[in-house]
Image (cartoon, coloured by chain):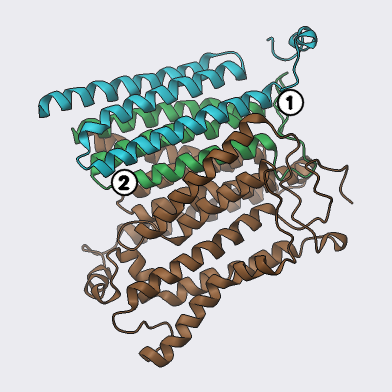
Amino acid sequence: MTEFLLGAAAFVLGTVALGLVRLLRGPGNADRMLAAQLLGTGGVAVLLLLGVASGVRATADIALVLALLAAFASVAFVTGANRPDGEPVDAREGLDGQDAG
Amino acid sequence: MRLALDIWSVFAVTLGALFFLAGTVGLLRFPDTLTRLHALTKADNLGLGLVMLGLLPQVSSPLGWIGLIAVWLLTLLSGATVGQLLAGAVRPPDWDRASARDRDAGPSHD
Amino acid sequence: MTSALVLDAALVLLVLDLAIWITAARSAYGAVVGFVAYGLVMALIWVRLAAVDVALTEAALGSGLTGLLLLGAAARLAPYESAETASGPGRALRLLIGLLCAAVVAGLAAVVLLLPDPAPTLAPKVAENLPPTGVLNPVTGVLLAHRAIDTLLETVVLVPALIGVWSLALDPGWSGRPGSLTPLRTGGPLTLLAQVLPPFGILVAIHLVWVGADDPGGKFQGATVLAAMWVLVLVAGLRRPPCVTSRPLRLVLVFGPLLFIAIGVAGIWLADAFLAYPEGYAKPLILAIEAALTISVAAVLGLLIAGQPTGEPQSGHRSGARP
């Protein structure tokens, strides 16, 4: 069972890695915003699997913290908090082929 | 009984992992940010739910069950609201159908 | 090939890829997103190495909070980015930097790989001296009993850091409220999130601090979660950031470190050394310090994200360009 759970964790990690490839390259900032969501859900799944496989209860706490902070990171992306001119990330910039930066 | 629980765990976790894969495939193949967001939030959250259901029999203490379910509910809640937020950022909430044709002629068709 | 090996290999490959991406990314924004992903994968590696406290801190502070601060920095620097990259170091210099970094990595790898087996460690000594502290988590024991002076200095240094951020304010803004978190449009989902998430966040933070005595957890992680919830409420526009001159705010900021110092000084009389705990009172004192520090550190972290005071009118909408 431990072997299986670790294998499942490796598999989910693989899918997260694949998704990251897309998001980090994805044209425009809109796709990069999705990264927070992907890492949050995928990371929580991997952590839960690792936690049950290793029997360390505290790993679920890490998953809990991750779930809370992933939502927060997405909010920060979206509201453009801390952008100097207050503009939220213009998701449409870069969609017509120009990379925003 | 133990064997039945283990079989359930293997089944649910495998199904959950496959949903994660489906979500990532959607992420890689869909043409547009909104559709990618859809694949990401729906498929990945479903995968997480199945993984969580599969892990429940493997944890022996009730506190552990509460922990797993709490994590899942929190991820579900934040995933749902964040999905709406991200979608609103890509397509502003004051988008109206009249100007949709003008906008759709632009970037979101490629 | 066991699944553990596959998992570990996947983690190592992923972290190396992310490190290369961060170094090679063309925009600061992309690099920061890569950094957040990198922090998460590091947290997973720490879990695999059975260092759950470090993993918790990495996920909360290293990836979450620092990622957020870097995101703000990348956003502020965006207008100047093309000019900066144009005047950056030339190819030869970059090659030299790369070689020197590789040399440092090789040196560290050599040191780790050439360690005698079993490697020298203080773990048995810590385990021996843990019972008098009353806590079961050796990390908490070391941080708050054996090496409490380090933790004291770490928490005290946060206050000058905050003062440093505040000192970036322009003169007219000095006594105002931090202005960089005002949302442009307050939407339905954001308000919902900011109303529903914080109660859970507070519960999780209390859980982390309470459980930190015997299990992985502790004040920094709890404080990060609290700070994140507070910033969420600010960003959604449900509350305004506090004025930086407000006395209750300043009291909250210094309360934790002051309590820590007071207990340390009291230790000189009661237990013969600065920061020594009297016999039998170690655990309650540690819990009191942790509780007070959680609140202070949470306030400091939240204000660090909120940025410097701008003194602009806070009506929920940004007013024009900055002076």
Chain coloured cyan: B
Amino acid type, label 1: Glu
Q: Which residue is mark 1?
A: A93
Classify mark 1: residues with Cα within 10 Å, few (<14), some (14-19) or many (20+).
some
Q: Chain A appears what colour?
A: green
Taking the image as shown, residue A90 lies to the left or right of residue C53, namely right
Q: Secondary structure at mark 2?
A: helix
Mark 1 — on which chain does it sit? A
Taking the image as shown, residue B1 lies to the left or right of residue C71, namely left
Q: Residue at x 17, y 23 (%)?
A: B7
Foreground residue among A4 and C119: A4
Label 2 with label 1: CB-CB less than 8 Å? no
Quadrant of the image containing the N terminus of chain B = top left
- Establish if B92 lies above or below C98: above
Classify mark 2: residues with Cα within 10 Å, few (<14), some (14-19) or many (20+).
some
Mark 2 — on which chain does it sit? C
The location of residue A54, given as percent across then percent down, is 24, 43
Can residue C9 be seen in the rendering of this structure?
no
Q: Residue at x 54, y 35 (%)?
A: A36
Can residue C235 be seen in the rendering of this structure?
yes
User: Residues under labels 2 and 1: Cα distance?
Assistant: 40 Å
Chain coloured brown: C
The location of residue C110, given as percent across then percent down, is 36, 58
Q: Which residue is mark 2?
A: C48
Residue C122 occupies quadrant = bottom left
- Establish if B83 lies above or below C174: above
